[in-house]
Amino acid sequence: MNPLAEQLNESLKAGNAHLYEMLSTLGKEIYFPKEGILSQSAEASSLAKKFNATIGIATENGGPMHLAVIQDNLSAYKPQDLYPYAPPAGKPELRSVWREKMIRENPSLDGKSFGNPVVTNALTHGLSIVADLFVDEGDAVIYPDKNWENYELTFGIRRHADIVNYPLFTDDMKFNSEGLRESLLAQKEKGKAVVVLNFPNNPTGYTPGAKEGEQIVAAILEAAEAGINVVVVTDDAYFGLFFEDSLSESLFGKLAGLHPRILPVKVDGATKEEYVWGFRVGFITFAAESKEVLAALEQKTLGIIRATVSSCSHPSQTFILHALKSPEFEGQKEEKFHIMKGRANKVKSLLDSEKYADVWEYYPFNSGYFMCLKLKGVQAEDVRQRLLQEYGVGTIALGDHDLRVAFSCIAEENLEELFDIIYKAVLDLKG
């Protein structure tokens, strides 16, 4: 094993041996090179005043070489903030500004020990980093039966995890914290589990309330007290889009510092929060009591980044940083929030009118981009195909009877027509 990896592992063992035990084989072996091209280039950037022949970019006239056909469309930004490689961890100022934003929007983080967010190529990349660092073949990865299908690829296919699902909802349509608890405690023999918490949930648009949040935290704590090492990933892709009766913070804050056998990992980003899906800017943040542990986890994360994407898009980071620092940012974001909330409320009022009660029920939703219908007497895939072929309407079929509808991309004034068409398609199939 590389001495740098061994050094990081020793830091983890000294700071919290349980966190070292959570690492996958790759997680134990990975490190960020200290004496490679990047470190030598960094040293040269501060000392090579005459010529710097280390960096793998082209320069001209004292700055990064670039084409006018590109720069002319980006003239609001300096070339040095667009064209050179961004640091593997991301632009330092962006990381600091995002951390400040996290604390502002999650008061439960006040006084907690957690690291500086590391920039990822959006949330999928952040989840992939978690999988690489902490999941070996046969490790249990626990998340609800209603989930984002990419979890299966990220944890199951790529890392050969043992995927453990539990029903998302109880019979009274609350978050099934008991199902989570039982799934966790069932890993006693393995001694390790990775839990993925995704709120607002994709596909249902559900976020638990305060009492449910306490039950989730209690279930995870019980598992830790039973001797199970638990990596808890809060997939906060749709963070901030909380419309009614739900938690308004990430559970990352409640989990930080809770128990030595619990490692909270927050995966979030500008992708959905700031409506910049194609920019692909996300973040991964660890919580731990020891600064040495946080430093070691960051170095291992940088090793994964270096070995895969090397670094993330510099222009996208610059654009996001500029937006976050703008005095107009909060007002513009609030405006979009109310548009989204208006759409969610319109859908709920339509569904609560009993207009469609004979052909479907709906799962609780109070946040995010989506909601799910539970169809009666017809197959979801049949309805999806009917909507596409006969009405030119796209939806997502999930399982036998669930149909996901993204109200996020439908204007409020068109929502009633949309659900009327879905209703008609179901009636067509029922004959």
Image: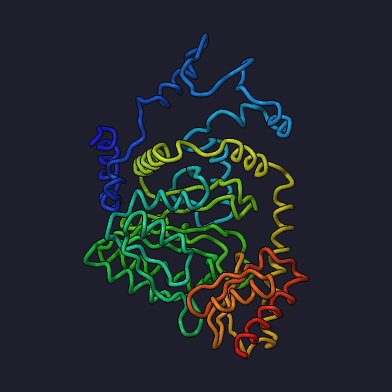
The one nearer the camera, 32 or 263, is 32
**Which quadrant is home to the N terminus?**
top left
Position of 11 with respect to 411 (left or right) is left
The image shows a total of numbered marks equal to: 0
> Eyeballing the image, is 275 above or below 393?
above
> Eyeballing the image, is 354 above or below 10?
below
Where in the figure is residue 361, as x and y percent of width and height? 58, 84
Where in the figure is residue 24, as x and y percent of width and height? 29, 50
Q: Residue at x 70, y 86 (%)?
A: 353
> Eyeballing the image, is 419 above or below 275?
below
Residue at far front of view: 389
The one nearer the camera, 279 or 424, is 424
Residue at far right of view: 413
Position of 93 with respect to 258 (left or right) is right
> Eyeballing the image, is 90 above or below 235?
above
Where in the figure is residue 194, as x and y percent of width and height? 35, 60
Position of 403 with respect to 72 (left or right) is left
The one nearer the camera, 355 or 247, is 355
Q: Residue at x 75, y 69 (%)?
A: 412
Q: Residue at x 70, y 87 (%)?
A: 355
Where in the figure is residue 408, as x and y percent of width and height? 66, 64
Q: Residue at x 54, y 68 (%)?
A: 203
